[in-house]
Image: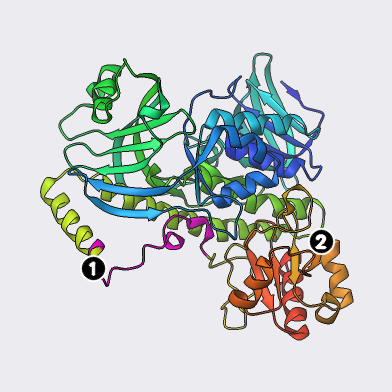
Amino acid sequence: MTEDAADSDVLVVGYGPVGQVLSILLAQHGWRVTVVEKYLEPYNLPRAVSFDRHAGRILGTIGVADALFPVSEPTKDYVVVNGEGQTLMHFELNQDERYRWPEATSFYQPGLESALVGRGDQLSDLRVLRGYEAVDLTEKDDSVHLTVRGEAGEQVLTARWLVGCDGANSFVRNHLGVPVSASDYAADWMACDVMPHDPEEFPSQNIQVADPAQPRVDLSAGPSHSRWEFIRLPGQSFEDFDTVENAWRLLTHFGVSRDNATLQRYVAYTCLARNADQWRSGGPGRVFLAGDAAHVMPPHAGQGMCTGIRDVANLAWKLHLVLAGSADETLLDSYEAERRPDAQRTIDMSVNLAQLIGMVDPSVAGYRDSALLAVRGSDDAPSRDPEAFARPGDDALKHGLFHAGADGLFTGADSRIVPQARTNRPQAGELCGDTLVLLSTEDPGTLVDPALADRLTALGGTIVHLTPEVDIDGTYTAWLTEEVRAPAALIRPDFHVYGAARTRTEMTDMLNTLLAGVSGRS
């Protein structure tokens, strides 16, 4: 056994999309990142097929947006129909003029991973060790030691921090002995990834067919690719369900056959919902979980990968500040405090949709249909605004590093995601992301104490005066005026609003609170 002489700042276990995004976010700041991936080649078939606009925005900040356009397409709507084809739910998923990403995007995962791998290859501080499996892990007060096994035998890699992005069967989580909280939901589904011979014969859709005789799903998996999924019915054994003959039989529900399509892959899996009880290790606390290593959920809201990307966007900027010596290690406690409850809300929503779609009892399904059809036909029907349904990543976070008053409630703006609009900045004009950004419609000199401005800058933060030349369409100015109702707001690197200030006194309080929270004195 040898010990690797080239210590890293961060070790990442697992190089799927979540590990890729985390590694790039950190390496872009110049931190030495070593990734351990047990597979020699990227998985060349689709798994995830959708990402939301928040995940898209994060992908944009790491420089892969242009590479995604050929392998993705906007998702127009989210539709649930019953066995008779009646629409039970219908959510329009349109482009929001305040954002440059669609509310939902269907994509071909091998294309996304190719773009992420290519971006990672451009970063000299990112080293990827393929064909190495993590087999042991030891935490010390100032470092983490990971034993990996490859063709040449075992070696020990060391780093200051380690993040397990190694999927639902995570070695890191299992090694730490972290229990998981699981919902009662469990169902067997089959996913069939198909390339139609004539894509126009099978237009892109996002339809959940809540048919008790055979619940099924029709999804786009990116241009010229389709995903159809089917639940295993009571009385059918898993062995009979999980066959290529059964896959082709089920595909006839959508008119798909060997004559008009190629079956790339079929996979039967047990759909579960669970959330790790602990996302940071005890003791030295130098190990974190992210993505499927921390949580799994039914796929019916298209939020599994998105939730993982939000995890690492949250963790990366905090690790960056700690590595730079600008923040105390206690800042990292806010990662679990913020992300675990948000993931649980997304899990709960996904379970609710899975149970709604997967009902196989005809009588219960009949009651469901009657209730939802009545709601759709009622003038008093609750809002079906996509804001409340299709974008769980935009929810305000309830706990963590945000500006709150003495009563514990947020002051000014809550912690939702800031809009994304055109500015005079190069590279698509993104003002926010990567660093702390203070947006102000007033001259910052009148709002910000110079000493506090210097301390914010020392954290890598920037202050932007939103003049008409900067805020080209007036989007940020309108947002501050009409929604935040304050002339200034502080935006975190993960696009969440830290807080807002109406006066110099409020600004001083907000920045002092931020600095105290980052330094561990709050």
Label 1 sits on what residue type? Ser
Measured as percent of width and height from the top left, residue 358 is found at: 25, 44
Residue at 38 percent of width and 55 percent of height:
91
| Residue 390 magenta | yes
Which mark is drawn over residue 501? none
- Disc 1 crowd, CA 10 A, few/some/many (<14, 14-19, 20+): few
Q: Which is nearer the eye, 300 or 31? A: 300
- What residue do we see at 78% from left, 78% from top? 442
Residue 247 in the image: above or below residue 493: above
What secondary structure characterizes most of the magenta part?
loop
Q: Give the numbered dot on residue 459.
A: 2
Secondary structure type for disc 2: loop
Q: CA distance from mark 1 to mark 2?
A: 53 Å
Would you name the residue on which mark 1 appears? 378
- The mark nearer the N terminus, 1 or 2, is 1
Q: Is residue 69 visible?
A: yes
Check the image and name the residue furthest to the left.
Answer: 363
Q: Quadrant of the image for the C terminus? A: bottom right
Residue segment shown in magenta: 376-395
Residue 279 visible here = no
